[in-house]
Amino acid sequence: MTGTLRVGNASGFYGDRFTAWREMLDGGRLDVLTGDYLAELTMLILGRDRMRDAASGYARTFLRQMEQCLGTALDRGVKIVSNAGGLSPSGLADALRALGLDAKIGFVDGDDVSAQFPDALAANAYLGAFGIAECLRAGADVVVTGRVTDASLVVGAAAAHFGWSRDDLDALAGATVAGHVLECGAQATGGNFAFFTELPDGGRRPGFPVAELHADGSAVITKHPGTGGAVTRETVTAQLLYEIGAPAYLGPDVVAHVDTIRLSDAGPDRVLIGGVRGSAPPPTLKVGVNTLAGYRNAMTFVLCGTDIEAKAALARTQLVDAVGADGLEFVLARTDHPDADTEETASALLHVHVADTDARRAGRAFSQAAVELALASYPGFTLTGPPGDATPVGVFTTASVPQDSVAHAAVLPSGERVEIAPPEIVTTSGKSRGSTPGRSTTRRVPLGTIAGARSGDKGGDANLGIWGRDQAGFEWLRTFLTVERLRELLPETASRDVDRYELPNLRALNFVVHGLLGRGVAASTRFDPQAKALGEWLRSRLVDVPEELLRAARAEQVEV
């Protein structure tokens, strides 16, 4: 089929703006509206829900949103595609039918591979787009899935509309890139944007994104008229760099080569993504494996005034004496300032985490022991909160399984089950390194003066993308910001293996910091467990920037 397919997004995670579905349906024309609910942590949450109630396992928020919006979508001919099915897409499909709106519901099955991982709470393969496409081709009004790649929601809709086959690799790659831009909702329209102060509304309430897809896989990223935020080359670049890893972006249906992407302005709040090349996907599927690994708890001591180190040492010794050292982790955050004019800025924080297989020791035995020190420890003793019980620790890891070992299937609105054949395949990837920076008259300023960044998590690894605001800025950045320089600027990465990739078409670099987040978000005790602010920390570091770049930045303020 020819013509443009308008695909919107109304959810970037389980807990995103509840009203976004209504806003997107009422805000302008759409052919398809997608919703992404499944972060790595979400699968763990749904797994624990299912332990308590076997009938659960899907995103209940989505069902409430459909109670309010599905009738409107049906009236306007807007197809709904979402991975809100989580661990129970069939259960969500049944719940949608029970709404009584006579909608044609299809769902995608087969991602559950827990039989191959018997010790896991949940193990789910990241399926591709063709099960979604099969349901849509069969006339489904709504398609719900379990674990598919986030971009597959858009790719499936495009494959159904344009009639793509598995051999249309460039088109599939282009739609994958568009899907990646849409998948995190308002992050593509100014949300979490490094230069938010330049947005027309200061980033107050960004709208949700829309992709106008074409038969060749190219797409224009835009948003509904009158909604907040902005769509610019930089807001799109920021999202393109989010959690991508190597330039050869592996997917179940295609490898999208991020270093072939070309962005161009297509009008106000319109950015064209073109030139994306695709190659055959790998013979395996990524599997997200969630396991339970004991229990955790935390308490925070406030240390005010003088002798901060000694106060921290006393609290540490006393707590170890009370509960033992096993599983305890102490982190002293020196947030205090000398001669401070407020009590808060005169104070440091001693964070204490405990992990144990025994829920009792990690629970009240630990937190109550901290409270019991209140009148027998350092002067000015106080805690930031009351004692609490332990919570289960979930660990997310990844594995892989052969594509042909997974029973990927589309369950059509008629109830017919259609098996989705795997692709035929193999791929390679590469990485590049920076060179030695040259000499120039410089001034010491925050790196963020001339560069934007976006960061996040992939299991226990952190992904950090950084881009230059113009070509000259990128050329300097690519020589300046080597792996060694990154480790100097972010000392917490110094002991970690770091991969560095160059993306010249995006004027960007991408770093993968292995193991920075420990065993992953649900188990990490790091201050920023999902590395969401890692890029902003890097932008805040003072570096010597050539004066000519700073003059150019002052002379040409980028309009967003």
Image (cartoon, rainbow, N blue to C red):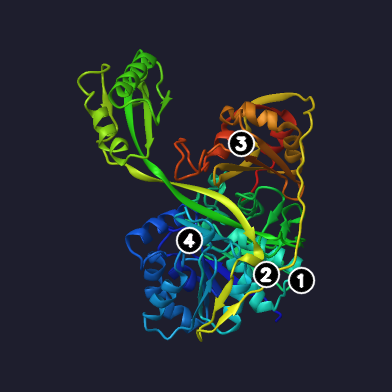
Instruction: State the mark number for residue 126.
Output: none
Q: Nearer the viewer, mark 2 or mark 1?
A: 2
Type of the residue with mark 4 = Tyr
Query: Which is nearer the N-term, disc 3 or disc 2?
Result: 2
The residue wearing badge 3 is 448
Instruction: State the mark number for residue 422.
Output: 2
Instruction: Name the residue at the left extreme.
Output: 375
The residue wearing badge 1 is 167
Type of the residue with mark 1 = Asp
Query: Which is nearer the N-term, disc 3 or disc 1?
Result: 1
Hey, which quadrant is residue 129 in on the image? Answer: bottom right
528 or 285, which is in the foreground? Answer: 285
Residue 190 location in percent, x, y? 55, 53
The residue located at (50%, 82%) in the rendering is: 76
**Against 95, is 16 above or below?**
above
Q: Nearer the viewer, mark 3 or mark 4?
A: 4
Q: Quadrant of the N terminus?
A: bottom right
**Against 425, is 241 above or below?**
above
Distance of label 1 from label 4 (alpha carbons): 29 Å
The residue wearing badge 4 is 37
Q: Nearer the viewer, mark 3 or mark 1?
A: 1
The residue located at (72%, 61%) in the rendering is: 281
Distance of label 3 from label 4 (alpha carbons): 31 Å
Distance of label 3 from label 1 (alpha carbons): 42 Å
